[in-house]
Image: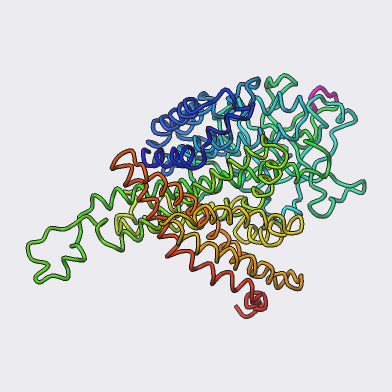
Amino acid sequence: MSGIRATIDYLLFDWMNVESLTAHPRFAEHGRNTFDAVLDLCEKLAEEKFAPFNRLVDTEEPVFDGERVTLPAATTEACRAYGESGMLAAAQDYELGGMQLPCVVEMAANSFFSAASIGIKAYSLLTVGNANLLMASGTELQKKVFARNQFAGRFFGTMNLSEPHAGSSLAHILTRAVPDGPEHATDPLGPRYRVSGRKMWISAGEHDIAENIIHLVLAKIPKPDGQLPDGAGGISLFIVPRHLVDSHGRLTGERNDIALAGLNHKLGYRATTNTLLNYGEGRYPVRAPGGTDGRGSGAIGYLVGKPGEGLACMFQMMNEARIQVGMGATMLGFSAYLASLHYARERLQGQSITARGTVKAGVGRAAVPIIDHPDVKRMLLAQKSYCEGALALQLYCSRLVDESRNGDRGEAARASVLLEVLTPIAKSWPSEWCQEGNSLAIQVLGGCGYTRDFPVEQHWRDNRLNMIHEGTHGIHGLDLLGRKVRMQKGLGLRVLLDSMNDSIKKAATLPLSSPLAHILSGTVSSIETDTRAAWVDEDPAAALSNATLYLKAMGHAVIAWMWLELSVTSERRLEEPRSESDKDFHRGKLAAANYFFRYEVPHIEVWSSIVAARDLTCHNTDSAWF
């Protein structure tokens, strides 16, 4: 993973200067040495426990025999090794057994695992997200019993949102939660309910990696007439453990009424169990903890937060997961890029384009590595520009998390607004364009890339999920154009464009970066104009019909901004290079920046102009016409 590590070091230390975060009291005990130690640990663990088994866990999928799920031993060993490393609690307080790492360093360290085996990494990703939500919204005892045991690796976690009939449309969920007897409100673990319903597409919903699985379940509390409340405002959030626990976190020995109905068989991401769970089916009937009312109907669940505020609580985990999905997509793109780069250096095929123009070019001339062919360079530059630009965005968003939590009042407010605007882009852009990079990696390998003898086809299959889960492109386009750029009277868009303009000013005086700054300046102006044009009469049908194209345009603009920043960094570093290989490293960054501006940025005008024109071709097409 040396290619990944070099770029991570460059982004963290040369570009973002993350060592400056140690000026904040929370990170004062850290420095470059501790950051490097964490990166070293995670790189080594990913190389030894994750990467060697990525193909194995793809071919040996989880198996359900009707009673239990069996995983390859490699999955269990890797997840437990990850837990023992302390990385589940990396960002937590020292008092909780954490390292108090900055979010940006934690994210960078975890990128090695996503690159090595995204399917194995998903178990810990969900566990940390679950625990973080409980730290933000749970009671003190819920934090102690459920969150802290997840940080320690004793318990693992999930999020249960979708149902067979309701994927993204959470307002229509039918899972219900009713108070569990007269003493339900006095349970020390929180108001106790009986949860009944079916949850679909639940990643990591069943396994034996840890002692317990803590499910966070969205459900509705019936009204007095027994009917479920309408809309998303009636959704509440519940902790529903697979095995019941006491107020000290000890397993009681009784299984909760949660039954695995079956596994979903996926195109990729096969190492992660994906489940249909039935709550309150009656297969494992349980009595109320400490109660005397016999064995009731439904799984035991504990309310998190207040009734009707479940979706707001869950967004804590969903937004975190969206950036993590973007990072996963990025690293799948990065892994495929490195695989195709290695192949292109080794594969001999054809003659150089200059040789083709000479007399008798084909006589006595040896084949050249395919990396010497301009079209192969094009595909490699495209991949490099996608995955490295996306990685810069993911780490930049992670740095915004640190600033929003630790900066002064003004810095924190600005970082929070900018992070909100960038989140749908950070999730969606890598999911589409690093997937396109995966396709190009297959193309570089040619017929070999289409076989299972090489890893790039698995990278493509694994990455295809990322355009779907945690919100589709359509949903994030609506969120970006319908909410984020308009929030607080347009403050979100203003902060984003001002940040881009600051980078443009910084680049304008540098000979290599200034042409790119000029291009981005025009892009910023057109995006601002086209955003206003989309909402000229406040008609949501006209404004939002092409919201996905707006997401694409804004995504490309943001990645161009990232590349302008990196162009400035590398141009300045070339003034005093450390070695000839260091020169090549930074020249490679400049080549990728130029590629993105010359080959990709021109697409922005086409996409953005359709949004500004409020074209209704898709909106006005009658369903019968298909």
**Image point (54%, 70%), residue name:** 605
The prevailing secondary structure element of the residues shown in magenta is loop
Q: Nearer the viewer, residue 498 or 231?
A: 498
Where residue 236 sits, quadrant-wise, is top right
Q: Which residues are magenta?
A: 288-292
* Looking at the image, residue 136 lies above or below residue 59: above
Q: Quadrant of the N terminus?
A: top left
Horizontally, residue 234 falls left or right of residue 540, namely right
Q: Nearer the viewer, residue 212 or 618?
A: 618
Q: Residue at x 29, y 55 (%)?
A: 448
* Figure quadrant of residue 28: top right
Q: Position of residue 190 (x, y in %)?
A: 80, 29
Residue lying at 71% horizontally and 42% vertically, measured from the top left? 410
**Display coloring:** rainbow
**Label tally:** 0
Left or right of residue 337, residue 479 in this image: right
Horizontal side, residue 162 vs residue 138: left or right: left
